């Protein structure tokens, strides 16, 4: 059986496209991980606090969302590390919180509160507050 050039080209293009899509999905999948979401929330809260941005009206909703995300993160860690007790899991979360806070502090040491990244954190804060 002989395959025509046009058919072979279409098959190659389709396989390349499917491969690129699979790669893109795999690369972006970390954004749905509880650790990533929790980190983004902590960074957003830290940035708004450090820059004295008035988010008083949003604080309740944001806190509820952060509580749910933290609990989901805690469950995820418990599943990943079944040998660890609640204290060890809490320590892991505390270390991640400290790391996120340090990242924002380091960023603000070089930039100021008018930087686009801080504006992005404020936007995230607003989005997550609405989910609360």
Image (cartoon, rainbow, N blue to C red):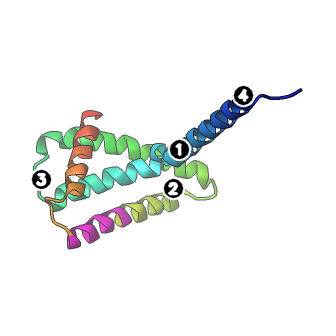
Residue in the image at 35% along x and 66% along y: 98
Depth-wise, is mark 4 or mark 1 nearer the camera? 4
What residue would you read off at disc 4?
A: 7
| Upstream in sequence: badge 2 or badge 4 | 4
Q: CA distance from mark 2 to mark 4?
A: 58 Å
Q: Which type of secondary structure does the marked residue at label 3 adopt?
A: loop
Depth-wise, is mark 2 or mark 4 nearer the camera? 4
Residue that protrudes farthest toward the right in the picture: 1
Q: CA distance from mark 2 to mark 1?
A: 35 Å
Let me know if residue 102 is in the magenta part: yes
Depth-wise, is mark 3 or mark 4 nearer the camera? 4
Residue 85, position as x, y percentages in the image: 56, 57
What residue would you read off at disc 1?
A: 24
Tell me the quarter of the picture where residue 131 sits. Answer: top left
| Upstream in sequence: badge 3 or badge 1 | 1
Residue 61, position as x, y percentages in the image: 24, 38
Secondary structure mainly formed by the magenta segment: helix
Let me know if residue 51 is in the magenta part: no
Q: Which type of secondary structure does the marked residue at label 4 adopt?
A: helix
Specify the segment rendered in magenta.
99-110
Q: CA distance from mark 4 to mark 1?
A: 26 Å
Instruction: Name the one closer to the observer, 121 or 88.
Output: 121
- Contact? badges 2 and 4 (CB < 8 Å): no
- Local crowd at mark 3 within 10 Å, few (<14), some, or many (≥20)? few
Residue 23, position as x, y percentages in the image: 58, 45
What residue would you read off at disc 2?
A: 86
Which image quarter holds the C terminus? Answer: top left
| Upstream in sequence: badge 2 or badge 1 | 1
């Amino acid at each position: 059986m002989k395959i025509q050039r046009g058919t072979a080209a279409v098959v190659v293009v389709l396989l390349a496209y499917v491969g690129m899509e699979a790669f893109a999905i795999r690369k972006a999948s970390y954004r749905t991980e509880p650790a990533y979401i929790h980190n983004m929330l902590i960074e957003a809260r830290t940035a708004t606090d450090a820059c004295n941005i008035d988010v008083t009206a949003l604080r309740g909703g944001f806190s509820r969302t952060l509580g749910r995300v933290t609990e989901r993160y805690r469950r995820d860690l418990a599943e990943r590390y079944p040998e660890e007790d609640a204290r060890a899991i809490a320590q892991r979360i505390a270390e991640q919180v400290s790391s996120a806070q340090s990242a924002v502090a380091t960023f603000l040491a070089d930039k100021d509160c008018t930087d686009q990244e801080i504006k992005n954190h404020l936007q995230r804060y607003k989005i997550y507050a609405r989910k609360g």
